[in-house]
Amino acid sequence: MDVPDRTGLPSTKELFSCLTDCHQSLLTGSSPKLSDHEVGRLIFCGVCGQEPGGDTQEGAESSRWELTCLSLTLLKKICCSVSDRSLHADILSLLLGHMDLMPQLVRLFQEEDQVISHLAAQSASVCVLYLLETSGTVSPAWQEKCVQVFSSSHPGPELDACLWSLTDVLKKLLKKSHQALLGDVAAAFDGSLTAFCSKLLHEDRIEESWSGTTFCLLLDLLEALSASGLICGAGVCLTCQKIPISHSAALLMAVSRFSEYFVKKRTLLLLKRVLLQKPGEDWSLEGVLSAVGGRSSSDRRVLAQSVLKAVADGWLHSVQVEDAVFFGGARRGRENEGLKGDGTMLRAVSLVLLKSVELHLQTGAEGTDSAAEVNSYLQSLWSFLRRWRAAQAEVTHACSWISLLFGEQDDDLMEAASASLSIFLSCRRSSGLEDHATMEATCASGCNPHCHFLLLLQSLSFDHSILLDFLISSETCFLEYFVRYLKYLRGDWRGFTAACKALSDTHGSEARSRGLRLVEYDSSDESSEETPERDKLSGSTAAEVKLQCESVSSVAAVLLDQDVCRTLDRAVSCLSDLREVVTKLQVKKLFPYNPSSLLKLLAAVENLHQSSPLSL
């Protein structure tokens, strides 16, 4: 059918029929019955909200809403079909060129109806991407609208739509690694976004300026901008890409002050990802980001200093952690949990602090008492974590906290272990001490790298195949951590065996008290009259008790030594098996990189074990 011009619009029924036919054609991959010009006119009429002929005033508003939604949905599908199969390009050319649809799209951003506002933002985003990829230019109408809204900064649907639309464009460009286009889009909004965040991210009024939904949309945008900074590299250095760093104090304040828990959590996760150089990890960008170099660590050190200052001012006391909530709202029973509270939040707090301490130590001034400073930060963290400890999860060895917290998250576990290793090595170099007292202090602060590694192996049941998976995977920093740890282990075998003993002491202490209680007869309630004969018998009994105590203590010591050796042997056996399988893969040219240095380190550990007096 021919589509009449504006003076002779079809009825609502005819419009729906035509638009539905076009939609079905897209789904089946066939061409619509109407011409490209006719399809374009229908979509334009629907987006503009022009009332079809023949409608009564009572049903006009409902018809307009339905037609607008259907037209926006159809427009989005046409854009996607052009990207996927190079179809319907003429329709888009007409709509975005001759018909100038973009101003009409961005006009819908201000609709109070959230469905229409969001559909308009979605459609505008795919149109912007189409123009970027075909002409290399940012849509002037879209850019002007977003800049104008950011400048006014009034909360509402229009601001939400602009934030969402810009974030969506950046995300899609990030997934395709369009470095040049990413730089162009970020540069187009650099000034307006910088002014926007400077105006609203004030520490004294952080919560007053935002709704929780709008603030989370901003956090998504800041994460996308941070990721774009990693993709673009040093060639493009924009202020808006560093907003999470320049306004880190306000973001930390948001964690404390926002009433909505999901805002607190989302803010903390952004800070964590920026510190770890993993922005966008929830958007399937891991492979993209792992292939590019990170930002200068000086930027992240600014964020680290903000975190440490906040911790020194008591920030951890204001961080709220709610009970863990799972799908459907059900809460898991705590009888088998080591921790109460939201594990994601606890891990984020811990990693933010550990990584901040690590970055701080990398620029520490010579001669400063870094060990005492670090210990104060870590003790603050342990105190924070103890607030969320279940009664049955008494932790007597501070180093156990890392495996307890991160046991279910391999990527975070490796980051925490790596940061702790760096902290330990930095403090060790600054102190110049390597005696047993230093190792005890390290365990007290929860940063003994030997304990962390042994607890990791125990959690894996000493299975070398899981270590192999970690070595091959690009999802964790295990390779970097593993090589650094083995280099340290090679020079501190005595510390490694001491850690085996410390862990054996911790795990075996309860069983050895049980042993002593077997001979505690002196607390008997019997009170019969004493006689010389009984005194003689009592003396004999005392000698027997003493002999039994000495015997039990001796047996306990032997069992402890055996337990230490068993832990040591299992750990080295796991590393030996790993070396053998990596060697076989290397010979067959199946290992993804050259493992020669790694194999030398593993062989050195085996040699140390063979010459150790504790080996069985």
Image (cartoon, rainbow, N blue to C red):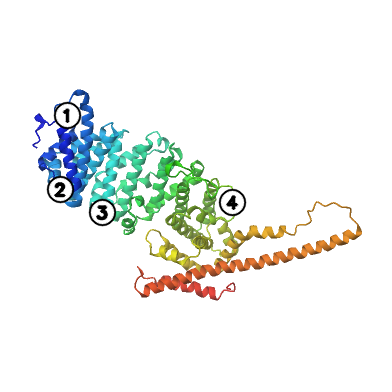
Q: Amino acid at mark 3?
A: Lys
Sequence-wise, the earlier of marks 3 and 4 is: 3
> Cα distance, mark 1 to mark 4?
69 Å
Query: Which SS class for mark 2?
Result: loop
Query: Which SS class for mark 1?
Result: loop
Please tell me whether mark 3 or mark 1 is closer to you in this view: 1
Looking at the rendered image, the quarter that the N terminus falls into is: top left
Q: Is residue 101 visible?
A: no
> Cα distance, mark 3 to mark 1?
40 Å
Disc 3 and disc 2 in contact, CB within 8 angstroms:
no
Identify residue for label 4. 394
Identify residue for label 3. 176
Q: Amino acid at mark 4?
A: Glu
Sequence-wise, the earlier of marks 3 and 1 is: 1
Residue 505, how many percent across, how many down?
Answer: 61, 61
Please tell me whether mark 1 or mark 2 is closer to you in this view: 2
Query: Which SS class for mark 4?
Result: loop
Sequence-wise, the earlier of marks 3 and 2 is: 2
Q: Amino acid at mark 2?
A: Ser
- Name which residue lies at 51% across and 50% down: 377
Are there few (<14), some (14-19), or many (20+) residues within 10 Å of tag 4?
A: few
Number of residue marks: 4
> Cα distance, mark 1 to mark 2?
29 Å
